[in-house]
Amino acid sequence: MKASKKTHTIVVANEKGGSGKSTTAMHLVVALLRRGHRVASIDLDVRQRSLTRYIENRRAHASATGADLVMPEHVTFAPQSGPAERRLRDEFSTCFKRLSTLYDVIVIDTPGSSTLLSRAAHALADTLITPINDSFVDLDVLAKVEGWNDMKSGALRVAGPTHYSEMVWEAKKARSTRGQRPVDWIVMRNRLSSLDARNKRQVERVLGELARRFGFRLVPGFGERVIYRELFLSGLTMIDLGEAEGGDPLTLSHVAARQEVRALVEALNLPAVVKLKAAG
């Protein structure tokens, strides 16, 4: 299953729930649409469907208020199990091939577990974004870290990769075998606190070591702000605020949050062909 060379596929994935995958995916979708890209979105979390619910809330908000909100073409699937799950993977493949002929960017949100659909999405990723909360609980998705007795001194050790890191590595090798461009793996530190703390510094140090060992880029994500969670019910994103809400003035926290979203989009380093298509 291959995307068009002119289509850039962004997969947002982490085998742990609550890391902010759907919020990240939604903000990327809207930010890229507002920049003039043609964007489609796919929700592969067929049970929870957080991204799908977010977009449904957005449509309802636009209908109720008359707000002119940009919308992607969005696709989701009904949950299946057993042999039917393989048919669902084939359905996803067919859908992806269609979208890749029509859109500049496809954003795929994945479940917080290992499924056939999730593994298929990883194999398609041009950019893989793995949001993690800034804690050792979330870092455990990427690597086995030992040395809790040495927490005070910071002498923590990376004992090895996890199943998720190994799966990403296998997906990267498969792309190389097919002669495709290497996946750009981005680990996004999410829900960052503005306060300096020993735990925050230790997580940063270990992530720096993992980035060198596993071959991902480390970027700052979204801060610990209530506004990100509140926007879900209205289907809005930080990019919409100030316009969809009748032009109400933004607070300093809102301005900072919008800059976080813009910084993430810039960190994607989208290929020139996608940027040129959007500009045209």
Image (cartoon, rainbow, N blue to C red):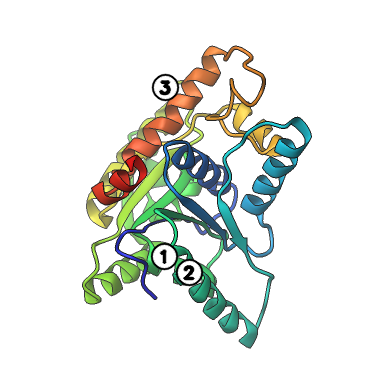
Regarding residue 119, the answer to whether it shows in the image is: no
Q: Which residue is mark 3?
A: 196
Q: Which residue is mark 2?
A: 98
Q: Which residue is mark 1?
A: 101
x, y percent for residue 7: 36, 59
x, y percent for residue 50: 65, 51
Amino acid type indicated by mark 1: Thr
User: Mark 2 and 1 residues: CB-CB less than 8 Å, in contact?
Assistant: yes
Q: Secondary structure at mark 2?
A: helix
Amino acid type indicated by mark 3: Asp
User: Mark 1 and 3 residues: CB-CB less than 8 Å, in contact?
Assistant: no
Question: N-terminal of the two: label 3 or label 2?
Answer: 2
- State the mark number for residue 121: none
x, y percent for residue 140: 45, 53
Q: Is residue 237 above or below residue 9?
A: above
Regarding residue 120, the answer to whether it shows in the image is: yes
Q: Is residue 144 above or below residue 234?
A: below
Indicate the quadrant where residue 49 lies. Answer: bottom right
